[in-house]
Image: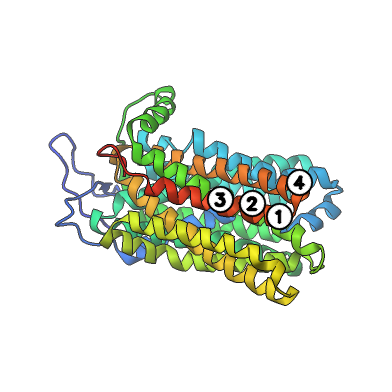
Amino acid sequence: MQAIQLTHTPSASQSPPVASAPPVASAPPAASAPPLPAALVLLLATGAGLAVASLYYSQPMLGVLGAELGAAGRALGLVPTLTQLGYALGILVLAPLGDRYDRRRIILAKAAVLAAALLLAGAAHGIGALLVASLVTGLAATLAQDIVPAAATLAPEAHRGKVVGTVMTGLLLGILLSRVVSGFVAERFGWRAVFVAAAASIALLGAAMWRSLPRFAPTTQLSYAALLGSLAELWKRHGALRRATLAQGLLSVGFSAFWSTLAVMLHGAPFHLGSSVAGAFGLAGAAGAVAAPLAGRIADRRGPEGVIRMGAGLSAVAFAAMALSPLLSAHGRLWLLGASAVAFDLGIQAALVAHQTIVYGLEPGARSRVNAVLVVGMFVGMASGAALGSALFAQWGWLSVTALASSAAIGALLVRLWPATRKHDG
């Protein structure tokens, strides 16, 4: 792939890059900024998808892993847990570095570490090595959360929502297809081949990023401690960030409550279905992948607020509709669950893209940090939804889960309907 050159007019205090170095990315005036090259947008979307897919490759293979490595079920459960924990920790402590250092160098460094961690996982001969590799994989997979702010920085303001939506499509497809691909490859070539192929894909991605990405000028000179401390300052300063994080976190509560209890519900009466059927419901994520760029375009043209309210409202209706399932036959319930999953996934992903459009426009010099705040809020919502949903399902059954999910979505809608009190309370 040939390097994609981006035009840049240096400021008086910045020398033009030498001919052999990638150009420095900056935000040109909206009126004169051409759209990003399609090849670069595709590379960013692919990179986000491949990075986040690394979090999910292990999940369909846990049974095979346990048999070969001689690991018990509890130890095997730590594999996806440590991967997700590493990702959440990496977002909090590593993602803000994108504002302090050249984001291109961070992306390349994380790609190298991620490829090495996946190779370690593929070569593991004991559960201990696999657990270490899983934690490092989660930490390094946060390069997806460096790519999204990079896309927002490179995109001209008039096209930012569309570009971010397209990159989010790649990220969502990575989540959607990772389990399918890993299960298919593991069944035919073994689980180690999955990790080796994943490492090779990340290595190729790193090479393409090295050739195509421009350098990013740091936007702050804060020390690392001050950089992390500034997360709280950004939270206090921007009401729009607080509203976006709270609303998206509430939507994540419902999302996680549904997916954390679906397989258990389908396993019981009247369905008695296996995990493969529950996994097939994940294809509903395709709706969110399709919705992401469309939501971005609408946010560019008409503003993000309407997109968020539509997404939250659609999610609330979809969650509430599942309460009608006792009135239907078993076959009818499955159709209702599938339709509801498509609807709320579309609504939640549309709201996410619109929320990102808002927060990326708040403070261009802090895009990595505002993104970290938003994503950490989502993870808090997901963790809360999983815990509450599982407890409610065990105590009161599926209807209590739908009540939790629909209430959380209504709460998100109310947050967005509450009138802004300040200029930046978008």
Q: Which mark is residue 257?
A: 2
Amino acid at the residue labelled 1? Thr
According to the image, label 4 marks what residue? 77
CA separation, marks 1 and 4? 16 Å
* Mark in front: 2 vs 3: 3
Point out the tag, 4 or 3, that comes first from the N-terminus: 4
Local packing at callout 1 (Cα closer than 10 Å; few below 14, some 14-19, many 20+) is: many
**Mark sitting earlier along the chain (1/3):** 1
In-front residue for pair 174/321? 321
Question: Looking at the image, do the residues carrying marks 2 and 1 touch, with CB atoms under 8 Å apart?
Answer: yes
Q: Is residue 159 left or right of residue 98?
A: left
How far apart are the alpha carbons under marks 4 and 2?
Answer: 19 Å
Label 3, on which residue? 407
Q: Which mark is nearer the camera, 1 or 3?
A: 3
Q: Mark number for residue 368?
A: none
Circle 3 residues within 10 Å: few <14, some 14–19, many ≥20: some
The type of residue carrying mark 4 is Gly
Residue position for label 1: 261
Mark with earlier residue (4, 2): 4
Answer few, some or many: residues within 10 Å of disc 2's Cα (few below 14, many 20 plus, some between 14 and 19): many
- Tags 4 and 2 in contact by the CB under 8 Å rule? no
The CA distance from mark 2 to mark 1 is 6 Å
Which residue: 63% across, 64% down?
322
Q: Nearer the viewer, mark 1 or mark 4?
A: 1
Q: CA distance from mark 1 to mark 3?
A: 17 Å
